[in-house]
Amino acid sequence: MKEEKIFPRSLKWPRWKYPSIWLTVTSFILTFIIFFIPNLEKKYCFIIGIPLLISSILIQTFLWIIKTFVVIFKRISCYSNLYNKYQMFKEFCSILWKYIIEDRLLEIDWATYQGDKFIIALKNRSKLNIKKGNKISVFDKRDTVPMGQFEITEVRDDKYYAIGIKNIDPVWLGYVKRVGETRAVPYYITAIYLPSGE
């Protein structure tokens, strides 16, 4: 998630910007003048002129450091409030998962690859009223990465059978192809019923 969506403008990390043109030109002109001051030794010209020449960069860097420390102080001061908001958001997501998503989850019993078809069996949940032709999406619970979409081909009292129709995870598919039929489906791979077929 981008920082702009998490923190208000006053809490964003400042960006270092190139010095303005007028400041750069001014420092260059002053340095040029110093090198042509009569009776001023060359070593003093360099001692004064070089820092003056890069003064525009030094000033910009100094301002950037100051702004960064200000943001650090503000973030420390606001940490408690931000943490509380995060906890509230986390609790909201947990409730959303429980009442909207969890009720539509299906446990995968086994997977197999037969006749160029990737087939999975899912444990029956009668309250979902799943029918032949309905779509099932398989995903990784750890990071919600989709692992393929399946279509129900058969409904029995204890199981649903579905075949892969698109976007099958190549790693999972390769493993099933290699071992044939497997009941060792990783705990983090689960399926969700998509009533709208999305």
Image (cartoon, rainbow, N blue to C red):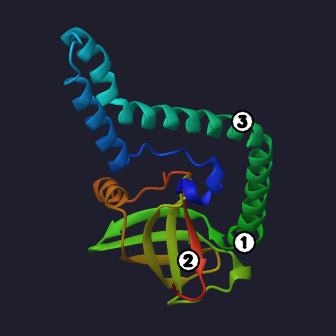
Q: Nearer the viewer, mark 1 or mark 2?
A: 1
Q: Is residue 151 above or below residue 112?
A: below
Q: Residue at x 26, y 36 (%)?
A: 28
Write down the quadrant of residue 73 in the picture.
top right
Quarter holding the N terminus? bottom right
Q: Residue at x 64, y 37 (%)?
A: 70
Residue 76 has which mark?
3
Percent across and percent down for residue 76 are 72, 35
Q: Nearer the viewer, residue 191 or 86?
A: 86
Percent across and percent down for residue 52 are 33, 27
Whole-Å distance between the Cαs marked 1 and 3?
A: 40 Å
Q: Secondary structure at mark 3?
A: helix
**Residue type indicated by callout 1:** Asp
Whole-Å distance between the Cαs marked 3 and 2?
A: 53 Å
Q: Earlier in the sequence, mark 3 or mark 2?
A: 3
**Residue type indicated by callout 3:** Ile
Residue 160 has which mark?
2
For disc 3, the neighbor class at 10 Å (few under 14, some 14 to 19, many from 20) is few
Q: Nearer the viewer, mark 3 or mark 2?
A: 3
**Residue type indicated by callout 2:** Tyr
Residue 103 has which mark?
1
Q: Earlier in the sequence, mark 1 or mark 3?
A: 3
Whole-Å distance between the Cαs marked 1 and 2?
A: 16 Å
Task: Note whether residue 92 is visible.
Answer: yes
Q: Is residue 67 above or below residue 53?
A: below
Percent across and percent down for residue 178 are 28, 54
Residue 14 has which mark?
none
Q: Is residue 23 left or right of residue 70?
A: left
Task: Note whether residue 141 is visible.
Answer: no
Q: Earlier in the sequence, mark 1 or mark 2?
A: 1
